[in-house]
Amino acid sequence: MRIVPTVLSALLFASAATFAAAGTGQAAESPLHVTTAHGRFAAAYTPGTTAVTYNPALVPTGARVQVFGVSGAAVGTATALVVSGLLPKHEYGAHAHAQPCGVLGDAAGPHFQHTPDPVKPSVDPAYANPDNEIWLDFTTDRAGSGFALSKVDWAFGERRAHSVVIHEMHTHTDPGHAGTAGGRLACVNVGF
């Protein structure tokens, strides 16, 4: 499986960039933040739940999820999503969201945006795009496994994302629909 080498490459790249920045004094001002989250999708959310499915027909209870992230001012933010046990050959959307998971999918709030759209809900491609948000769309293979990698030029500051939500289809990019990807199927809490 090529997922682990790809994730490790992303992490090593970010680490190398941080060490290179150390010579300029940037690393001391903006340390590297590494994030990991993993678990199995639970049938219902309770406090302390890492991952929950809201639609077991599309994200089965017990399916696995892992999120890896590296963020720092010198390197931007790289995020990887790895899933297994989902429907085979299905196109899913996934994004970092502003709030933690909850009993209902809406608890995770809107997509986290580096530069927030003043209009809610955000469907303007000037704000709802993969450079201003963390998009992790993926298509599962024959076994129901999938992988996505996002790389943006910005790092998290005081405002941070708190979860990754899996949606029912790949993300739209057209005006009036930008950033939409159908219903919220599942959520994983991530300490970005």
Image (cartoon, rainbow, N blue to C red):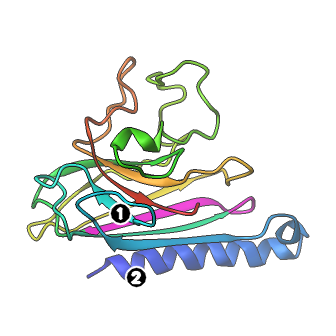
Q: Verify CB contact (< 8 Å) between mark 2 and mark 1.
A: no
Which residue is pictured at 73% across the width and 51% down the height? Answer: 157
| Closer-to-camera residue (185/24) | 185
Question: In the image, is 75 to the left or to the right of 53?
Answer: right
Q: On screen, 1 above or below 35? A: below
Instruction: Point out residue 146 in the picture as x, y percentages from the top left corner.
Output: 25, 65
| Whole-number angstrom distance, CA of label 2 to CA of label 1 | 24 Å
Q: Secondary structure at mark 2?
A: helix
Instruction: Point out residue 148 in the picture as x, y percentages from the top left corner.
Output: 36, 60
Question: In the image, is 112 to the left or to the right of 166?
Answer: right
Q: Badge 2 is on which residue?
A: 5
Q: Which mark is residue 51?
A: 1
Query: In which quadrant will I find the C terminus?
Result: bottom right
Check disc 2: other Cα within 10 Å, few if <14, some if 14-19, many if 20+.
Answer: few
Amino acid tagged 1: Ala
Range of residues picked out in magenta: 72-83
Which residue is pictured at 46% across the width and 60% down the height? Answer: 189
Q: Which mark is residue 14?
A: none
Per the picture, the main secondary structure of the magenta-coloured stretch is strand
